[in-house]
Amino acid sequence: MTDWENGMQVFYPEVTSPKEGQEVEVSILDKGTVVGSFRGQANKPLPVRLQNPKTWSPDDPFLYDVSIKIFEGKKVVDQVKSYAAYRDIRMAKDQNGHQRMFLNGKPLFQYGPLDQGWWLMDFTLPRQMKPCYLTSRRQKKWDSI
């Protein structure tokens, strides 16, 4: 979860049957370089402060790599890797008092379809990502007309 006001990503790792003294370490990486890390108790919130966070947006969908390790003392007993975006999406009132969607602290007017895209073959997701990419590019072009 992004804690936008404090420049942090907060992780809630769940460890089944944690042993006494086990700790969990979450590291956030940008192209292999650690830009934030926090080590704490298993099954507790782990807030990771980011150095100069890069925000995710439709124009720049940047994702951080995430490494989560479980320690018993100095020994790593388990680990998993994933990814995360640093973004804030919320409903708030604009300067005129109108309820709007905000992305990363800025109002964002949502153009495009009202629901998910439907694909002819089986009415679920596309088999390839190229149609999704082309649809999003088309919608961005419509926004500028």
Image (cartoon, rainbow, N blue to C red):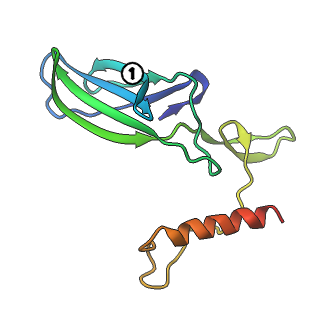
How many marks on residues?
Answer: 1
Residue visible at 17% across and 15% down in the picture: 74
Q: Nearer the viewer, residue 93 or 2?
A: 2
Residue 112 appears in the picture as rendered: no
User: What is the secondary structure assignment of the residue under circle 1?
Assistant: strand
Q: Is residue 73 above or below residue 98?
A: above
Residue labelled with disc 1: 37
Task: List the single residue furthest toward the bottom.
Answer: 121
Q: Quadrant of residue 115?
A: bottom right
Residue 42: x and y in percent read 25, 24
Residue placed at 61% from the left, 70% from the top?
Answer: 135
- Closer-to-camera residue (139/23): 139
Residue neighbourhood size for the residue with mark 1, other residues' Cα within 10 Å, grouped as few (<14), some (14–19), many (≥20): some
Identify the residue shown where x is 37% and y is 27%.
27
Q: Amino acid at mark 1?
A: Ser
Q: Position of residue 86 (x, y in %)?
A: 53, 36
Residue 66 percent location from the top left of the image: 37, 35
- Name above or below for residue 91 compared with residue 136: above
